[in-house]
Image: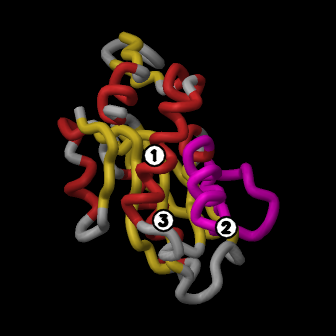
């Protein structure tokens, strides 16, 4: 099986969504194909190696879809990172810049035990702001960030450059 081709054939471009000038990468056809979806999950797990991760962080919202089955296959816990105001207990928060404004994400303060090895999983790496903020939350919570795995990296936005020495693993780079 040619996983790269399978993945690329199941990601469709939607022009001018959610606003004019944006080329949205729609992963719903990939998610609907059980072979492609399983291939993505397996590729992330195989890249990092079973038994090496204690917790998987999924970033709201499409990151949850990928992160939960990855956590299951690692035998690891799943930790959601959500937009401000969506988590019920005490949280850490991190604010970061967007192209037009700012966003704040949060994580529960009790999400990690000291030294937990944490993999962050998301659907897209764009400018790197969300991933960098998530990594800061993990570190503040006592976890050790071992890497970031994404389905799609938009390399023309140079998000990887904002992440320092973080191990970034992307399955598709455009």
Residue matched to label 2:
77
Secondary structure beneath label 2: strand
Query: Given this view, does label 3 or label 1 mark the residue nearer the observer?
Result: 3
State the residue at coordinates (36%, 33%): 1
Say the numbered circle drawn on residue 119. 3
Q: Nearer the viewer, residue 133 or 168?
A: 168
Q: Residues within 10 Å of mark 3 (few under 14, many from 20)?
A: many
Residue matched to label 1:
102
CB atoms of marks 2 and 1 within 8 Å: no
Q: Earlier in the sequence, mark 2 or mark 3?
A: 2
Is 109 on the left or on the right of 150, as rendered? right
State the residue at coordinates (50%, 69%): 50
Secondary structure beneath label 1: strand
CB atoms of marks 3 and 1 within 8 Å: no
In the rendered image of this protein, does residue 174 appear above or below residue 43?
above
State the residue at coordinates (47%, 40%): 39
Percent x, y of residue 174: 23, 32
Percent x, y of residue 19: 43, 16
Q: Is residue 79 magenta?
A: yes
The image shows a total of numbered marks equal to 3
Is 170 on the left or on the right of 41, as rendered? left
State the residue at coordinates (65%, 58%): 72
Q: Residue furthest front?
A: 1
Is 119 on the left or on the right of 152, as rendered? right
In the rendered image of this protein, does residue 83 appear above or below residue 99?
below
- Mark-to-mark CA distance, 2 and 1: 29 Å
- Mark-to-mark CA distance, 3 and 1: 24 Å
Query: Given this view, does label 2 or label 1 mark the residue nearer the observer?
Result: 2
Q: In which quarter of the view is residue 54 placed?
A: bottom right
In the rendered image of this protein, does residue 25 appear above or below residue 42?
above
Stretch in magenta? 65-91
In the rendered image of this protein, does residue 172 appear above or below residue 129?
above
């Amino acid at each position: 099986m040619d996983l790269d081709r399978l993945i690329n054939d199941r990601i469709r471009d939607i022009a001018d969504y959610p606003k004019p000038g944006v080329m949205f990468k729609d992963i719903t056809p990939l998610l609907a194909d059980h072979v492609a979806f399983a291939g993505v999950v397996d590729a992330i797990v195989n890249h990092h190696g079973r038994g090496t991760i204690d917790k998987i962080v999924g970033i709201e919202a499409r990151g949850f879809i990928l992160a939960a089955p990855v956590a299951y296959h690692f035998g690891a816990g799943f930790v959601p990172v959500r937009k401000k105001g969506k988590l019920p207990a005490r949280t850490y928060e991190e604010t970061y810049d967007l192209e037009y404004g700012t966003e704040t994400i949060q994580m529960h303060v009790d999400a990690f035990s000291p030294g937990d090895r944490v993999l962050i999983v998301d659907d897209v790496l764009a400018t790197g702001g969300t991933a960098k903020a998530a990594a800061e939350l993990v570190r503040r919570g006592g976890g050790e960030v071992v890497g970031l795995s994404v389905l799609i990296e938009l390399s023309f936005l140079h998000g990887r450059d904002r992440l320092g020495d973080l191990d970034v693993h992307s399955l598709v780079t455009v």
